[in-house]
Structure formats: structure tokens, C-alpha cells
Image: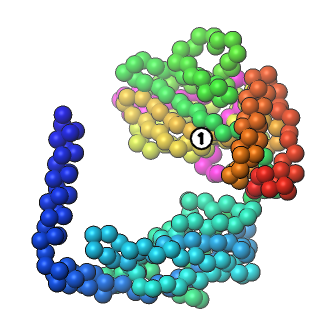
Amino acid sequence: MPRQIHILSVILLVMTFTLHLSSLEAGEMEDALKKLQTGEQKIDFYGIAIDQHGKPVEGAKATFHASAYGILRPKYTRLAAVSGADGRFEIHGGKGARLYLEDIECHGYDFPREGNTRGFTYDLAYVERHRPDKENPVVFHLRKKHTEAVVLLNSRASILLSAPKNISWFGWDVASCREWTAPAAPEPGYFRDYEVTGEHDAEKKEWTLTIKMNGEQAGVLMSDKLLYEAPAVGYAKEVTLTFKYSDKPPLKHLYLRLRDCGMYARFDVEHGHVSENGVFFSCKVLVNPYGSRSLEDLVYVGSDESGELILKCFKEARKAMKEQRFAPRPPFEEWVKDGKMKY
């Protein structure tokens, strides 16, 4: 009932605001809009695309949308440009208050969300607005992908410990996304890739976790760096970490070797918290089932054939994991050449 009352209140507020606007005389609305529009400027923007080695990226398509003030809702204009041999590009449009970068696309490159500015204010009412400078373009960082890209097994993994429920142990099967909250022997057909034991210290406001990897070649390595080739060394069979209470994930990336054969994988911690109630991490998982250290994923091109090939790779990868072996490597280079996949 309280939720319904809240929704009803919001609806009434919107209706009241709409009636207030409709009660304004046309001249008043036009005057208010003109006042806002006096802060708009002509949209000119200068950018440059470079890779992780500082080299200019040619042929990168940058897509933006510009917003201008309008009655009740902004007016949007789509703008785009392609970088030249020097990596530079220019955007020129009509008057607007803001410019937002949607994406930068280029074959063989990835455009990371982290480390790149996407929103630019042109409104004259803002002191710290964007000031276009052709001699000093905004730098956008792209990442040149490795040529040895494969279809990585995409999966999920988590760590969940709960003080109120007395859950201080957690296990996970990466291949099947099966979890355990008690250290009993896994059922036939499942394998416990890792086990997590937690100790809670309410006085110090912290949790101490011990992560134990299972498998002859298994190991784990923590890092703040996002790598597209798994580290060759530095893995430990077991690690112990202490985390203070936090509403943000205290880890960024975990690099693992899985199973008896030692498949390389990367766990990206997307959500998580540590509190008096427990520990929770939710991870995106990428597994290379073919034996190499490449964590560069081939991209689906949108065709039915491409989708079927990826599903087949996933099926073979899970089968290989269950059998504690590497999966046979498909002819990825031929698939890319034939347009069935792309880097």
C-alpha cells in the first residue's frame, strides 16, 4: 500500500506540474524558453582518437548527440565524424546546450567506458563549460585488440557470505554456475572451482576471506588492472584477504587458472559490498578453454550463423571443463576472414 500511495503521489505531482505549464500564457512560455536558449552556443568539437600505445587511430567513427532546450523536453540532434590518418576528427552542428558522446567504433579496436569523458556542457550559464580548441583536441583512448582473439566462455560467478544466516563458507562451479553454502561433497557431474571461507570481526568492522582453488593447475591472482592476456605467473592455490566494511567492491579483477588443465580466466567484479550483514561479490566471468592466455573475445556479428557458432563454442567449452581438458580450438581466423565473427 505505501508503494501505491507513493506512485499515486508522483502521478499527481506530474499532473499538477503539467496543468501549471498549460495555464501559462503562450508568451510566458516563449519568454522562459528564450531565456534558456540565450545560453546555447554553436556546437563545435575537436577530438583525437589514440590507442594504448599513443598512436593515432584512423577510421574511428565517433557518434554524438547534441541537446538544445525545448518546451517540456530537450531537442536532440545526432552528429558523427570519422577520424583521419592523424586520429583527429571534428563535429560541427547548430546551437545547443550539451554534447554527449554515444560511442567510438573502429574495426580491431575497443572503446573502454573507463578513462574517457563522454559529456560536454556548452551552456554559457556554466563557468566550467567546454571550450572547443582545435589546437588542443579532446583525447579519446581506444584499445587495439590482440590478433589472437577467441570465443571466450561468458559466465557469471559470485561470492556470498551472510552473518545473520551463519553462512561462512561458499563454493562455486564456473562451468554450470552451481553454488554451495555448505562444504559437503559436490554432486556427480559438478566441480567446485573455488571455496571461500569467511571470518567476521564486528568490532573491527571487517571480514577476512580465504579463497581456495581446486584443481591440479588451479590458482588465483588479484589485480586492479584490466588485462586482455592473463598473467603467466603469480597464481596462488590459496589466498587470504581482509576487507573493511564498504558499499563498493574492494576488488576489481581476479585472474584464475581453472581445473586440472589450468584454463585461464578473468573475473570482473561488477557489484559488491562488505558489511555487518555479510560479503557479496557479483562477477562477470570470461574463460579461455583453449589453453592460451588470451582473454580477447571475438565479437558476434548479428547473423544466425554467428550466433550458432558461439553457442557451439560455449557447449564445447562446458563439456571440456567437466572433462578436465582443453576444448579443441576452432578456426577463428577463418571465421573472421569469412565475416562470421569480428575482432
Left/right placement of residue 160 relative to residue 254 reads left
Which one is nearer the viewer's eye here, 230 or 295? 295
Tell me where residue 240 sits by quadrant.
Answer: top right
The spot of residue 2 in percent (x, y) is: 18, 37
Which residue corresponds to the image point at 56% horizontal and 59% vertical from the top-left? 114
Q: Quadrant of residue 328?
A: top right
Compared to residue 277, the image places residue 113 above or below, namely below
Total numbered circles: 1
Residue 80, percent from left and from top:
58, 76
Q: Is 75 located above or below residue 321 in the figure? A: below
Residue 232, magenta (yes or no): no
**The C terminus - image quarter:** bottom right
**Regarding mark 1 in the picture, which secondary structure is present there?**
strand
Residue position marked by numbered label 1 in the rendering: 284
Q: Name the residue located 61 percent from the left edge and 67 percent from the top edge.
A: 104
**Can residue 222 be found in the magenta stretch?**
yes
Q: Residue at x 41, y 85 (%)?
A: 95
User: Where residue 288 appears, x then y in whole percent?
Assistant: 76, 39
Q: Write the residue at 82% across / 42% down.
A: 292
Q: Is residue 61 left or right of residue 40?
A: right
Q: Is residue 115 left or right of residue 163?
A: right
